């Protein structure tokens, strides 16, 4: 993504376009010159070859004129004329050899008036030369092992009045002549007879020029012209072929090695290309500098926009450029930054306040989009459900809030605006809780689709308390009704039959009255203490107290009840116990509650044990019964309000659920602890601790 942004940035685009313009301009400006230069060198090469061909014609003409002059010189020799007239062949031959000695002329032929060979300095088939005498030209001897070409010139022997025949002088057009021409002109010279090379300067290179020439296939041949190109031993040549003396079978060819020209052309092309590249580089550098000068302020503005988008509104907008347009844009951006920064500051404050408000609300708050997905989840919702925001965000609400009935979904039972409903849902830890739910429809200002806001709170405890309160009221009614009924019956019996009641029956009635009053007193004390604890007015006044006296008072209070049910209280105390820091009256109430519970849940004719011992600066008191015991599930809520325990017995029905909560409140207010343990052999052992007073013991 970053490479894409860089390639499509303004600087990259400007640099690319500047370089492209420079390259195109250099190509447009340089390519014609490059082509013109190549064509010019090519034309110069061809012009040089063609000029060399013309020079060869002039050279041949000069040689022919020299031969013509030599033939004329011979023809005017009086002695030679006399020898021809006398048909003195030997004398003519001797005279001719004397004349050509020291010259490059090798062939002199004298022809008679019948065009027959009179004498020849070389033993060659020159009959054709006499039968077709020309003033100057070329003579070909095709029948020799290698065809020979001679440059000849002729003249009449004698005067017109005394015409005796012709004298013909010739020089061979051989490799020596070709090499001479090559060294003089720097060109390669060849003579071809019937398209076969018979004379060539290529032998000067140490090669069989004729064979190479024969095997050579031209790379390019222009039809209808006398030009051709070929390559020999890796060297390119331009060649021009001309006909010799109008003979269709006899041609000469002048070839120029253009390797140096090509090398020069290549070097010039390289130089030209290098110059173009330098121009491109310099133009590109200038384009880059110009692009940077143009794009730099825009890049600064772009960076400012990026900072805006990333939330950086503290950095001022600064642009190092004097352009009016750029300055106006920078000023507008700076003003926008200041306004936006101020607005963002206000929004952050409002959001912080709103977030703080939402986090401080204990109720759970969530919002749902049109598809039923969670878009907001408050801190209160996290605490109630156990789900974190990350776990529930953008997930369907039906996946998070699962109902007891698998065929019913949470989204289906959401109440309408202003309504409230209660529903049992499964929490993150697998527990089930009763939630009180209210809902409202929200339509954001920038959206056409409405969202649903749901506010809920955990009313599980309230539901339990509500149910237990009804249970408590029923039990309190029962607890009051039983002793009151007993009091009413005993009182009515005393009133009606007082004179006739025997002392033993009277004692039994009085004991019944006492137990009923004791039960009412205990129940009223627990109600008063529970109300005091709930209202926050509960107080204790601990001071050094004898535990023996507390146990004795509780025992005396509970003795009539225990006797009634045939139960025995066994007290096991050490010989010495330290004083305890306790409120005596309330501690007696603790023991009475524990002994009362033990009596309720113990069978008739059973033992109830009360033990006390010192350990680690505390005195621990335990009341053990032989009842049905307490299950593990009940122990967690055992000391909470309205929590009953155990099974009903013949002695008592379930109580009010206040006694143990009062026990816990009194003991903990005196810096002690409470608990319950299983008794070996069945039953339960309720215990509490009291802080001992150091260095003070009782006997």
Image: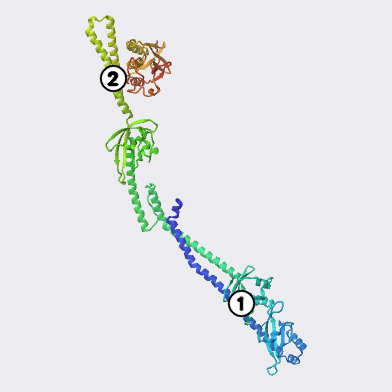
Q: Nearer the viewer, residue 599 or 291?
A: 599
Q: Residue furthest bottom?
A: 161
Would residue 524 be seen by someone viewing this image from the given angle?
A: no
- Kindly state the secondary structure of the residue where label 1 is placed: strand
Q: Which mark is residue 61?
A: none
Figure quadrant of the C terminus = top left
Q: Residue furthest front?
A: 407
Q: Residue at x 29, y 13 (%)?
A: 518
User: Farthest residue toward the right?
Assistant: 90
Q: Where is mark 2, residue-wise?
A: 476
519 on left or right of 299 = left
Q: Quadrant of residue 591?
A: top left
Per the model, the C-alpha gap separating discs 2 and 1 is 144 Å
Q: Which picture quadrant has residue 13?
A: bottom left
Is residue 53 depicted above or below 90 in this figure? above
Colouring scheme, one of rainbow, by chain, secondary structure, one colour = rainbow
Is residue 382 shown above or below 530? below
Coordinates of residue 430 in the picture (x, y in percent): 39, 31
Q: Which mark is residue 241?
A: 1
Query: Is disc 2 in contact with disc 1, using a CB cutoff of under 8 Å?
Result: no
Query: Mark 2 packing: few (<14 Cα in 10 Å), some, or many (20+)?
Result: some
Q: Percent position (x, y) of residue 412? A: 32, 37
SS of the residue under disc 2: helix
Determine crowd level at label 1: few under 14, some 14-19, many 20+ residues with C-alpha closer than 10 A.
many
In the displayed structure, does residue 4 sit left or right of residue 385? right
Picture quadrant of residue 685: top left
Residue 104 location in percent, x, y? 71, 81
Whichever of callouts 2 and 1 sits on the residue coming sooner in the sequence is 1
């Amino acid at each position: 993504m970053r490479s894409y942004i860089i390639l499509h940035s303004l600087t990259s685009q400007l640099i690319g376009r500047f370089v492209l313009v420079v390259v195109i301009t250099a190509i447009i400006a340089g390519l014609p010159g490059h082509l013109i230069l190549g064509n010019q060198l090519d034309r110069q090469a061809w012009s040089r070859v063609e000029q060399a061909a013309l020079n060869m014609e002039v050279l041949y003409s000069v040689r022919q004129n020299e031969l013509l002059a030599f033939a004329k010189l011979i023809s005017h020799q009086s002695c030679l004329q006399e020898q021809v007239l006398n048909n003195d062949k030997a004398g003519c031959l001797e005279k001719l050899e004397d004349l050509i000695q020291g010259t490059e002329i090798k062939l002199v032929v004298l022809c008679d008036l019948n065009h027959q060979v009179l004498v020849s300095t070389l033993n060659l088939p020159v009959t054709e030369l006499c039968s077709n005498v020309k003033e100057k030209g070329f003579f070909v001897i095709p029948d020799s092992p290698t065809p020979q070409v001679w440059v000849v010139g002729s003249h009449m022997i004698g005067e017109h009045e005394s015409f005796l025949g012709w004298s013909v002088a010739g020089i061979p057009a051989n490799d020596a002549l070709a090499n001479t021409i090559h060294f003089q002109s720097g060109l390669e010279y060849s003579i071809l007879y019937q398209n076969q090379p018979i004379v060539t300067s290529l032998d000067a290179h140490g090669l069989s020029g004729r064979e190479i020439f024969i095997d050579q296939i031209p790379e390019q041949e222009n039809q209808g012209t006398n030009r051709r190109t070929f390559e020999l031993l890796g060297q390119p040549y331009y060649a021009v072929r001309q006909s010799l003396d109008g003979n269709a079978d006899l041609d000469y060819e002048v070839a120029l090695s253009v390797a140096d020209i090509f090398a020069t052309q290549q070097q010039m092309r390289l130089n030209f290309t290098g110059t173009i590249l330098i121009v491109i580089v310099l133009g590109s550098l200038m384009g880059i500098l110009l692009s940077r000068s143009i794009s730099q302020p825009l890049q600064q503005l772009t960076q400012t926009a990026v900072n805006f988008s990333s939330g950086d509104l503290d950095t001022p907008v600064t642009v190092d450029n004097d352009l009016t347009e750029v300055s106006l844009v920078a000023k507008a951006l700076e003003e926008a930054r200041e306004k936006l920064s101020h607005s963002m500051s206000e929004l952050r404050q409002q959001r912080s306040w709103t977030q703080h408000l939402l986090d401080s609300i204990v109720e759970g708050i969530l919002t749902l989009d049109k598809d039923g997905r969670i878009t907001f989840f408050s801190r209160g919702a996290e605490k109630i459900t156990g789900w974190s925001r990350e776990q529930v965000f953008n997930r369907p609400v039906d996946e998070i809030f699962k109902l007891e009935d698998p065929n019913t979904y949470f989204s289906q039972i959401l109440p309408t605006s202003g309504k409230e409903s209660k529903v049992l849902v499964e929490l993150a830890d697998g527990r089930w809780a009763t939630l009180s739910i209210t809902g409202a429809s929200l339509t954001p200002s920038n959206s056409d689709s409405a969202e649903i806001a749901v506010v809920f709170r955990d009313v599980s405890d309230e539901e339990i308390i509500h149910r237990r309160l009804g249970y408590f009221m029923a039990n309190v009614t029962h607890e009051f009704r039983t002793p009151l009924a007993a009091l009413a019956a005993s009182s009515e019996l005393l009133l009606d039959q007082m004179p006739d009641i025997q002392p033993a029956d009277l004692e039994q009635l009085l004991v019944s009255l006492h137990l009923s009053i004791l039960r009412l007193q205990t129940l009223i004390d627990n109600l008063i203490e529970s109300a005091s604890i709930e209202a926050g007015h509960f107080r204790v006044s601990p001071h050094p107290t004898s535990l023996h006296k507390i146990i004795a008072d509780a025992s005396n209070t509970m003795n009539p009840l225990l006797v009634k049910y045939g139960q025995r209280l066994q007290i096991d105390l050490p010989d010495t116990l330290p004083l305890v820091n306790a409120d005596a009256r309330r501690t007696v109430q603790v023991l009475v509650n524990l002994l009362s519970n033990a009596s309720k849940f113990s069978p008739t004719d059973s033992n109830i044990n009360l033990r006390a011992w010192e350990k680690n600066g505390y005195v621990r008191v335990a009341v053990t019964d032989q009842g049905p015991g307490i299950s593990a599930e009940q122990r967690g809520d055992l000391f909470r309000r309205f929590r009953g325990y155990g099974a009903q017995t013949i002695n008592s029905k379930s109580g009010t659920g206040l006694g143990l909560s009062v026990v816990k409140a009194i003991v903990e207010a005196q810096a002690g602890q409470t608990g319950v343990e299983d008794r070996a052999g069945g039953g339960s052992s309720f215990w509490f601790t009291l802080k001992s007073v150091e260095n003070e013991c009782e006997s």
